[in-house]
Image (spheres, rainbow, N blue to C red):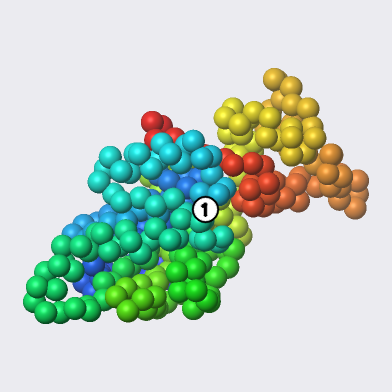
Amino acid sequence: MDIQWYPGHMAKAKRMMQENIGLVDIVAELLDARIPLSSRNPDIDKLAANKKRLIILNKSDLADSERTKLWTEYFSRKGFVVICADSKNGRGIKDFYPMCRELMREKIERQRQRGRILVPSRVMIAGIPNVGKSTLINRLFGKNMTKTGDRPGVTKNKQWVRIRKDLELLDTPGILWPKFDDPEAGVKLAVTGAINDEIVDKRELAFSLIGYLKENYPGSLEKRYDISIETDDGDADILDKICRKRGFFSKGGELDLQRTAIVLLDEFRGGKLGSITLEEPDR
């Protein structure tokens, strides 16, 4: 399945980020802890080439904790400062300010020696759509300063937010990149909700998710849907079983597989299938 999504507002958002990169000291990139590699925008690496870098593995409450540890080690080895966070519930957020201060320690000391006691550090908050940037900023600020939502594309424009006297954040729209060279990355982004649901085939997405869970998290589907999966069951067979178990039938009595696929994706995104990560560093 080849999924591509790069609407015009993303190109505009990228230009805006390029125009403002000179105003910030740190680029904090939020990644989806369930797909840390697939949710990394290669354009942000180019954009932030000369900036201090912070990686935030967000939605870590939904991810496999053992694999999150592997990803933390992976990015740390590459020289990034890493935070595991759940911005929705606030876990890990307390580490943000001290880590930013540590990244800026040398500059802060130089300013102090020049007699400049309070010059705010500026941080650009970047990442793909629906990864939780605005939720993170609201948590850091202590109240709702930016609009949030459970769909991609809620933040449309940049917004400066001062969360402390010495720290300012630049909220930016979620952006993807013009072409996914790896088709699997597009599928994973769609499965986790980073791509507009209206442009994807939800049944095909459900098949992809079922195939991965069957191999990597055996038992997760049986437990959630109270079904029995045989070794020779295909992905379509399993979706049929879930559909029957949930009693999703159309008016004509046929299986409503579209509704079943939507429910499966929604329940995965909401963590109801368990703590699941869709990729590992060694892959």
Q: Which residue is drawn at 28% across and 40% down?
A: 77
Residue 178 in the image, given as x and y percentages of width and height:
38, 57
Name the residue nearer the viewer: 160 or 119.
119
| 199 displayed left or right of 33 | right
Q: Quadrant of residue 238?
A: top right
Quarter of the figure with the C terminus? top left
Which residue extends farthest top?
231
Q: Does 259 sit above or below residue 150?
A: above
Along the line of sight, the residue nearer the viewer: 198 or 74 = 74
Residue 44 appears at what percent x and percent y? 31, 58
- Indicate left or right for 277 with 39 as reference: right
- Measuring 61% from the left and 60% from the top, which residue is drawn there? 198
Mark 1 lies on residue: 59
Residue depicted at 51% across the width and 56% down the height: 91
Residue 69 vertical position relative to residue 259 in the rendered view, above or below: above
Side (left or right) of 144 relative to 10: right
Coordinates of residue 35 in the picture (x, y in percent):
47, 45
**Disc 1, SS:** loop
Determine if residue 3 is in view.
no
The amino acid pointed to by label 1 is: Lys
Res 269 visible: yes
* Residue 134, percent from left and from top: 48, 69
**Circle 1 Cα neighbour tier, 10 Å, few/some/many (<14 / 14–19 / ≥20):** many
Residue at the (45%, 60%) spot, across then down: 93
Q: Which residue lies furthest to the left in this view?
A: 114
Q: Say which of 147 and 212 sits in front.
A: 147
Which one is in front, 216 or 9? 216
